[in-house]
Image: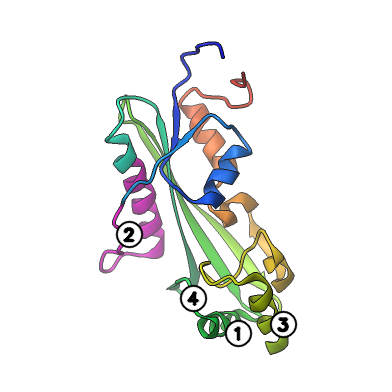
Amino acid sequence: MPHSNKPALYLASTSVYRQSLLKKLTNEFTAIRPDTDETPLSGETAYELVQRLAEAKARAVAARLSSGLVIGSDQVAVFNNEIIGKPHTVAKAEAQLSAFSGQAVTFLTGLSLLNAATGNTQTLVEPFTVHFRELTQAEISAYIAREQPLDCAGSFKSEGLGISLFSRLEGEDPNSLIGLPLIKLLQLLRNEGVNLLLDHH
């Protein structure tokens, strides 16, 4: 591979979902676990939380590097102004999906790109809203049994069979729903002089 002065790319995440999304753009990155305390601060809104954590994850990894671009991302699901957690149990998953029936859930994805050499940081929050159709109890039970979404905030996987629960999706980038807004990420990278479309070896 020819040596270029393109900065190395780091993903401050070990999430398989985020890694697979970034691989749509490039295979030339290193995933590093950021080891960030994700406890919300008192009085912090969901928007402020994902913005702060996306940047904190990028900073935690950048602190170990002398150069390179670090991508940090964090996501929460919000329903009726409350942050929705991962259900962990079938009963909780059923309760979450029953509450969402005929309602909308908004995903807020924080994205931060930090230049470890210059300290320049770009951070944004990308919203994406999922509208649920009216769900029957039988559909909810069948969905949970088939997809086992117990480690997913909101009890569904949009990239899988979760799509069968929705009436419509509303947002600029469906990738942000899975955890990484690629359209905005490409823009932040271009701001740093990196064009993944042109930089391919």
Q: Which residues are magenta?
A: 36-58
In primary-sequence order, the first of circles 1 and 4 is 4
In primary-sequence order, the first of circles 3 and 2 is 2
Q: Amino acid at mark 4?
A: Pro
**Which mark, by number, is residue 119?**
none
SS at badge 1: helix
Find out whether residue 21 is within the magenta segment: no
SS at badge 3: helix
| Whole-number angstrom distance, CA of label 4 to CA of label 3 | 17 Å
Residue on which disc 3 sits: 139
- Marks 4,2: beta carbons within 8 A: no
**Which mark, by number, is residue 98?**
1
Residue on which disc 2 sits: 38
Direction from residue 51 to residue 130 in the image, left or right: right
Residue on which disc 4 sits: 87
1 vs 4, front mark: 4
| Whole-number angstrom distance, CA of label 1 to CA of label 3 | 10 Å
Direction from residue 89 to residue 201 in the image, left or right: right
Q: Quadrant of residue 135?
A: bottom right
| Whole-number angstrom distance, CA of label 1 to CA of label 2 | 27 Å
In primary-sequence order, the first of circles 1 and 2 is 2
- Marks 4,3: beta carbons within 8 A: no
